[in-house]
Image (cartoon, rainbow, N blue to C red):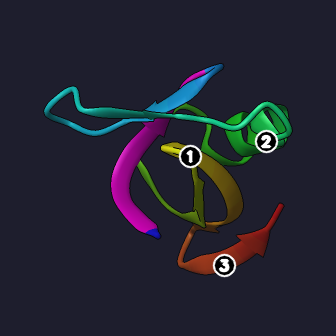
Amino acid sequence: MVLADVRVGVDRVVDAEGASVPLTDDADVWSLLALTGGRPAQVFGELEESRLRPLTVVVGGEVVGL
C-alpha cells in the first residue's frame, strides 16, 4: 500500500484530512519519524489486519528503506 502526504505519529500515520491508519507493533517508527522530520511524506508498506507496517519512505525524492 502507498500512502501519500501522510504525517507519522508515534503509533499511526495521518493524512491531511485526519484519516489515520495505525502502525504495527514492530514498525520502525523512530527511524520513520527521524527521516520525515514531522513533514508529510509518501510511505509504502504492508497492510496487515488494518495496520500498516512501513517498509520504505520517500525523502527528498529518494526512496529510503526502513
Could you tell me which secondary element the residue under label 2 belongs to?
loop
Query: Please, what is the three-letter code of the amino acid marked with disc 3?
Result: Val
Magenta span of residues: 2-9
**Can you identify the residue that label 1 sits on?**
49
Q: Amino acid at mark 2?
A: Ala
Q: Is residue 5 magenta?
A: yes
Give the residue pinned by disc 2: 27
Which residue is depicted at the point 67% across and 55% down?
54
- Quarter in which the C terminus is drawn: bottom right
The amino acid pointed to by label 1 is: Glu
N-terminal label among 3 and 2: 2
What SS does tag 3 mark? strand
Farthest residue in the left direction?
Answer: 17
- Residue reaching furthest to the front: 49
* Disc 3 to disc 2, C-alpha distance: 17 Å
Mark 3 highlights which residue? 63
- Expressed as whole percent of the image width and height from the top left, the position of residue 62 reads 63, 80
